[in-house]
Image (cartoon, grey):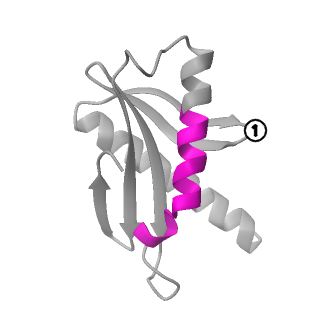
């Protein structure tokens, strides 16, 4: 398996583990890997009445930076634009529907859930 294929497969496995964890925390799974021209959202969940748009960042080591650092301002803007596309496609008015962007940052075996980034 090539390095990019391995990285992709690892990403899929990590996202599935994060999905299971969030479900255990009481969130409801809506969809994964929602794509639009402006970007992609890894997981879309519901936390009660609040829509949660989850970005998952995983680093096996911190030799090239921590997972949190990979969620740059540019990446955050892309996620927000993509979130608004999803909301428009599903007739969810962002002025009337509770929503937030969460980051799950995983460094090796240590994970941190950042709500409302």
Which is nearer the eye, 24 or 98? 98
x%, y% of residue 24?
Answer: 25, 37
Q: Look at the image and give the residue range highlighted in magenta.
A: 67-83
Q: Residue at x 48, y 61 (%)?
A: 57
Q: Position of residue 25 (x, y in %)?
A: 22, 38
Q: Residue at the spot x=49%, y=15% of the render? A: 92
On whether residue 14 falls in the magenta region, the answer is: no
Report the quarter where the N terminus lies. bottom right
Is-magenta flag for residue 82? yes
Where residue 67 sits, quadrant-wise, is bottom left
Which residue is tagged 1?
Answer: 37
Dominant secondary structure of the magenta stretch? helix
Residue furthest to the top: 91
**Mark 1 neighbour density, 10 Å: few (under 14) some (14–19) many (20 or more):** few
Q: Secondary structure at mark 1?
A: loop
Vertical arrangement, residue 28 with respect to residue 72, above or below: above
Q: Is residue 93 above or below residue 32?
A: above
């Amino acid at each position: 398996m090539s390095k990019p294929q391995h990285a992709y497969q690892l990403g899929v496995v990590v996202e599935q583990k994060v999905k299971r964890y969030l479900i255990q925390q009481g969130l409801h799974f809506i969809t994964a890997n929602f794509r639009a021209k402006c970007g992609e959202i890894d997981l879309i969940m519901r936390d009660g009445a609040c829509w949660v748009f989850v970005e998952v960042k995983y680093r096996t080591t911190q030799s090239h930076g921590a997972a949190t650092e990979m969620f740059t301002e540019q990446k955050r803007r892309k996620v927000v634009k993509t979130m608004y596309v999803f909301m428009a496609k599903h007739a969810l008015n962002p002025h009337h529907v509770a929503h937030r962007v969460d980051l799950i940052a995983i460094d090796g075996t240590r994970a941190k859930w950042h709500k409302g980034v």
